[in-house]
Amino acid sequence: MQTILVVDDELGAIEVVATALEDEGYRVLTAANGRHGLEKLAEGQVDLAVIDFMMPLMDGAALGRAMKEDPALRNIPIIMMSAVGESLVRERFSGYTAFLRKPFRISALIDTVRRVLG
Amino acid sequence: MSGDTRLQSSLPDNEARLRARIAELEQQLRARDEFLSIAAHELRNPMHSLLLQVSAAVQVARQQQVQPLVRRLERVQQIVDRYVKRASLLLDVGRMNATQMRPHVEPVDFAAVVREVVESYAPEAVFNRSSLSVKSPPTLCGRWDRLALEQIVSNLISNAIKFGAGAPIDVTLTAAQDTNVQFEVRDRGIGIADVDQERIFGRFERLSNHPAGAGVGLWLVRGLVESHGGSIAVHSASAQGATFTVILPLDADSQTQVHHDPT
């Protein structure tokens, strides 16, 4: 079973995203900000990280950079999601595999996850 | 003509140009605030029918006893509620700039407001590995603007959860002397550096090390508190958490009248 880490400070969003991915047969871990996300990544095998861009304490760009600097995490693909436009996100961090502009439909997320995980 | 004399003769011109530029910028600021106010309205209005539809769907799901659907739809209701509050916050920002905002004062139980807001944020606190503990009398009645009070309490608690680094948060409500009430939110998180404390209540200001959100929350809170004739202060040191203390008069009506009295 493949494991997906979802990092987002919006509890209402993360609940739905996690349930939808679990319904698709993935194991899902969740975290409320980049710091918690890094802790979850250190705990074990994660196949994909779905990360919100704007978060308190440690945002998506900082988490993405920290992942790319860590040899154990640098090959984990990242789907970055944000309510702000992709050009603004790209200025701060461009090492993601796919981008989802919020709000998005669950079907768009599932399609993107399937595509990224092959 | 010496350099000093030239400088002196050009001063009135410079001042006039500066005044014209300030007036122009103020006009632009007003136009932007008006737009913000309209935009917030436009964002909020469609949510009304959405909320009605969802609440109707909740009723149908209850009648049909489809429990998983009831739970999901109730979550949708909460999320839309919070969205409307965010849109309202933007609307309030526009209103606060465009006109002198006057609170709609009515009898309110502050303790009940605190309990309701804390309860609504409990899932967020758990998700952020934090906890909320409340010290409050069973009731604390006074006269304030209910929505403003909810906004003040919500903003301070939401910030404490976001920046509290997962440590316990203390929420305290007490009657201060006979005429005031004190509301305090203490977190044990990343804290606020001295340099940020000076400007954290300004508009569009965010923590220099941890920017998140639009940076209007605390500015709005201060505006709402001051519109009630109250005051807000923060005590913090970097990495040692932050304590926000709000003092409001028990009867905002009497205080705001005094506050606005030109004599």
Image (spheres, coloured by chain):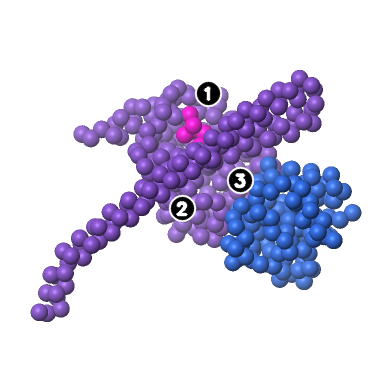
Chain colours: A blue, B purple
Instruction: Work out which residue is located at the far left of the displayed protein and give it.
Output: B1
Residue at image x 29%, y 34%? B260
Start and end of the magenta stretch? B146-154
Q: Nearer the viewer, residue B58 or A26?
A: B58
Residue at image x 59%, y 39%? B83
The reply to whether callout 2 and callout 3 are in contact (CB within 8 Å) is no
Dot label at residue B161: 3
* Residue labelled with disc 2: B204
Q: The residue tagged with tag 3: helix, strand or loop?
A: helix
The reply to whether callout 2 and callout 1 are in contact (CB within 8 Å) is no
Q: Where is B93 relative to B236, above or below? A: above
Q: What is the C-alpha distance between the residues marked 2 and 3?
A: 20 Å
Q: In the image, which is nearer the foreground, mark 3 or mark 1? A: 3
Residue A38 falls in image quadrant: bottom right
Type of amino acid at the residue the image marks with label 1 = Thr
Q: Where is A19 relative to B23, above or below? A: above
Q: Earlier in the sequence, mark 3 or mark 1?
A: 1
* Residue labelled with disc 1: B139
Q: What is the C-alpha distance between the residues marked 3 and 1?
A: 25 Å
Type of amino acid at the residue the image marks with label 2 = Phe
Picture coordinates of residue B57, whole percent (x, y): 71, 27
